[in-house]
Image (cartoon, rainbow, N blue to C red):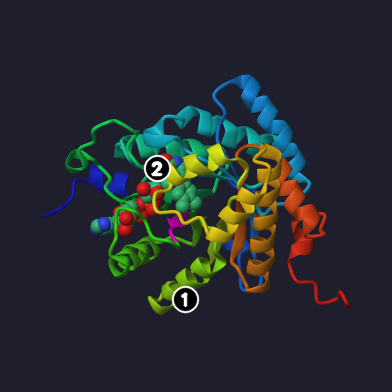
């Protein structure tokens, strides 16, 4: 059967003209053996005033010379425009490489095409591709959904990129303590491997508080043939309320007894709990760096204080000093 010329042309010609050259690096080019990345995650504030406040924190954190920063995407696309605005503003007004998160729940392929085109036109070349979860309390019929899993989204980003000659570096989520929807941990690893086979370049993990969970996850990935870098998600606990919220959002998360004991010893004020959280996250970071972590990704909760303190306690001015410098003699 011959293909009508008009259709054949459409399948090979770019759908849109995307500007060149690349302005910011691909994250996949930044990570390598003994070359961890350092990154900070933000969520888009709902008001202009909130966005300006966040920008003050971003500017302070820029001094730490992160490899990249990332901006979350609200459940089911609830922050679609806000995420895009913050991503493009950060890209334009700072020297930072910025990666938007993108979830595919409640999106059509046409929605995703439009979002990809917007980012590509804006010079954005890194995307964290996620399934996402349907918004709370909303019934959702997965059978009518155009996307079921993050792997479908990765596949779509790859083919959109091929059609439009845009090479996105793609990150995906990984869960050292397991994802609540797949209690079968062997099957879960198969699903993670499928994301890598679709074209994922690196993994960013859910936050965890025991490094041995990360090391075991990395070993299991290795045994399954998953060889892309695994960036560790670090979340300094800042309050009991925040901890409870995280426990609800990231079901299955383990809070180690020794951390809970340290929190119980405090006077219960937010400041003392924050100190315990920052100390814990600092020790985690130091140990991970000693053990060839692929990168450290700090969940900042839109504040600069905790991350700045972690760097200060590690005794460094910025991320460049956190990579091994063989010229430094002790
Ligand atoms: P998937 O990889 O699709 O996995 C989802 C579940 O389906 C898993 O249990 C998996 O094992 C299972 N699965 C996968 N493929 C198959 C298959 N073929 N058959 C059967 N089961 C399968 N959420 C947001 O809404 N916005 C954000 O900005 C955001 N950022 C995040 C950043 C990071 C670093 C992390 C770790 C999570 C983030 N999340 C975010 C949360 C994430 O969207 C949820 O955890 C979601 O439930 C899973 O997304 P995923 O991309 O891992 O999905």
Query: Is 291 a magenta residue?
Result: no
| Secondary structure of residue under mark 2 | strand
Mark 1 and ligand 1: say if the CB distance to the nearest ligand atom is below 8 Å: no
Rendered residue at 23%/33% (across/down) = 139
Q: Is residue 304 left or right of residue 158?
A: right
Q: Is residue 63 above or below residue 279?
A: above
59 up-or-down from 185: above or below: above
Any mark on residue 103, and which?
A: 2
- CA distance for labels 1 and 2: 27 Å
**Residue at 57% of width from left, 28% of height from top?**
45
167 left or right, relative to 41: left
**Mark 2: C-beta under 8 Å from nearest atom of ligand 1:** yes
* Left or right: residue 48 compared with residue 226: right
Indicate whether residue 173 is drawn in magenta.
yes
Instruction: Describe the element under mark 1 as helix, strand or loop.
Output: helix
**Relative depth, front residue between 80 and 298:** 298
Residue 62 point in image, percent of width and height: 74, 44
The span shown in magenta is 171-175
Residue 193 location, quadrant: bottom left
| Mark 1 or mark 2, whichever is nearer to me | 1
Tell me residue 153's x, y (percent): 35, 49
Name the disc covering residue 219, or none. Answer: 1
């Amino acid at each position: 059967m011959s293909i009508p010329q008009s259709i054949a042309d459409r399948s090979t010609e770019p759908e849109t003209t995307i500007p060149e050259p690349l302005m910011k690096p691909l994250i996949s080019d930044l990570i390598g053996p003994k070359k961890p990345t350092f990154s900070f995650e933000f969520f888009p504030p709902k008001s202009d005033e909130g966005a300006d406040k966040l920008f003050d924190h971003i500017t302070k954190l820029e001094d730490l010379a992160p490899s990249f920063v990332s901006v979350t995407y609200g459940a089911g696309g609830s922050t679609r425009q806000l995420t895009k605005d913050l991503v493009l503003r950060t890209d334009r007004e700072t020297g930072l490489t910025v990666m938007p998160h993108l979830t595919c729940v409640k999106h059509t392929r046409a929605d995703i095409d439009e979002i990809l085109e917007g980012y590509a036109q804006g010079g954005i070349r890194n995307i964290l591709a996620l399934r996402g979860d349907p918004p709370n309390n909303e019934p959702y019929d997965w059978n009518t959904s155009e996307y079921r899993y993050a792997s479908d989204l990765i596949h779509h980003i790859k083919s959109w990129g091929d059609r439009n000659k845009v090479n996105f570096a793609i990150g995906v989520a990984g869960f050292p303590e397991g994802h609540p929807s797949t209690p079968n941990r062997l099957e879960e690893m198969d699903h993670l491997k499928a994301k890598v086979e679709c074209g994922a370049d690196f993994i960013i993990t859910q936050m965890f508080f025991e490094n041995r969970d990360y090391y075991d996850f990395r070993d299991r990935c290795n045994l399954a043939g998953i060889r892309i870098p695994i960036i560790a998600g670090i979340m300094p606990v800042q309050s009991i309320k925040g901890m409870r919220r995280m426990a609800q959002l990231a079901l299955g998360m383990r809070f180690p007894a020794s951390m809970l004991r340290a929190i119980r010893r405090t006077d219960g004020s937010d400041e003392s709990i924050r100190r315990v959280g920052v100390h814990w996250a600092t020790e985690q970071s130091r140990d991970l760096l000693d053990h060839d972590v692929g990168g450290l990704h700090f969940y900042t909760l839109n504040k600069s204080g905790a991350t700045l303190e972690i760097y200060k306690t590690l005794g460094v001015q910025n991320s460049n000093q956190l990579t091994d410098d063989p010229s430094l003699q002790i």
